[in-house]
Image: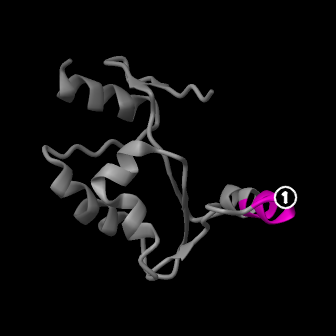
Amino acid sequence: MDIKKTMENLEKNGIKPYFVETREEVVPLVKTLINKGESVSNGGSQSLKETGVSELLACGDYDFIDRTGLEGEELRQSYIRAFGCDSYFCSSNAVTENGELYNVDG
């Protein structure tokens, strides 16, 4: 995959791409994209857990909308809040060179 071409095509499709070489670069990048106090949430992404993003979101600097352990009406309300949050983090199942994202949930 040609990273430069992919990033250019993502931009053409209205998506602002960011690229890092290592997982250690992910959290510092994310910190530049969100401000302390903003509302944030995330999907159930293993990539976010492995890179430390989930931990960053829950560190207390942000209004983290966490659905862990919630049930019933509390869970429903957390989903509603997540729809309106300042930043929502998730990962795509696939990114094509044409700048398309594919998201498939079970």
Q: Is residue 76 magenta?
A: yes
Residue positioned 46% across, 72% down in the render: 58
Relative to 40, residue 23 above or below: above
Colouring: one colour
The magenta stretch is 71-78
Which quarter of the picture shows residue 74?
A: bottom right
Query: Where does residue 5 sit, x and y in percent of width and height?
Result: 23, 23
SS class, disc 1: helix
Q: Is residue 40 left or right of residue 26?
A: right
Count of labels in the image: 1
Quadrant (top left/top right/bottom left/bottom right) for the C terminus: top right
Query: Where does residue 75 sit, x and y in percent of width and height?
Result: 76, 59
* Closest to the observer, 35 or 68: 68
Q: Is residue 5 left or right of residue 38?
A: left
Query: Where does residue 20 sit, x and y in percent of width and height?
Result: 18, 46
* Closest to the observer, 40 or 53: 53
Q: Is residue 92 left or right of residue 2?
A: right
* Dominant SS in magenta: helix
The amino acid beneath tag 1 is Gly
Relative to 36, residue 98 above or below: above
Residue positioned 46% across, 82% down in the render: 60
- Residue farthest along the right direction in this orientation: 73
Mark 1 sits on what residue? 72
- Residue farthest along the left direction in this orientation: 21
Quadrant (top left/top right/bottom left/bottom right) for the N terminus: top left
Q: Is residue 64 left or right of residue 34?
A: right
